[in-house]
Amino acid sequence: MRSGRMRLRGELQEPTTTQGRHGAPRQTWTTYANRWGHIQWQTGREVLQSGQLQPRRAGVLTIRYTENLEPTHRYKVGSRIFHIHNVIDVDERHRWHECMVEEVV
């Protein structure tokens, strides 16, 4: 992957559990790295959730290698959120990650 194709500047975020006002656990997101990325879209579909159709699209996010990147993390670009489902270390050379992502539109 040539770095010139990386046009999305996004934040890698990991889930963090904190306590809410009444002591109940609450999930928040913490940014731990900023990375340029490129998304190659693969599919688009609509999912019926809670009685409403929600459009979703899936693709492959390519970013520079980031240690400890996991499928529980997400990539955020402005108000757009891409949920990471799979992380691949391309050629196992610690240079690039390819991640299967899904965006709820």
Image: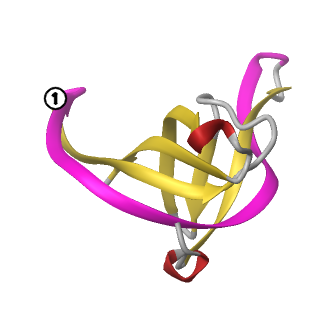
The kind of residue on which mark 1 rests is Gly
Q: Which residue is mark 1?
A: 51
Q: Nearer the viewer, residue 61 or 22?
A: 61
Q: Quadrant of the C terminus?
A: bottom left
Q: x%, y% of residue 19? A: 85, 24
> What range is drawn magenta here?
23-51
Based on the picture, tell me whether residue 41 belongs to the magenta stretch: yes
Based on the picture, tell me whether residue 16 belongs to the magenta stretch: no
Q: Nearer the viewer, residue 46 or 75?
A: 75
Q: Quadrant of residue 88?
A: top right
**Residue at image point 81% right, 41% down:** 67
Q: x%, y% of residue 46? A: 14, 41
Q: Residue furthest bottom?
A: 4
Way the structure is coloured: secondary structure
**Residue at image point 75% right, 64% down:** 34
82 over 78 or under it: above or below: above
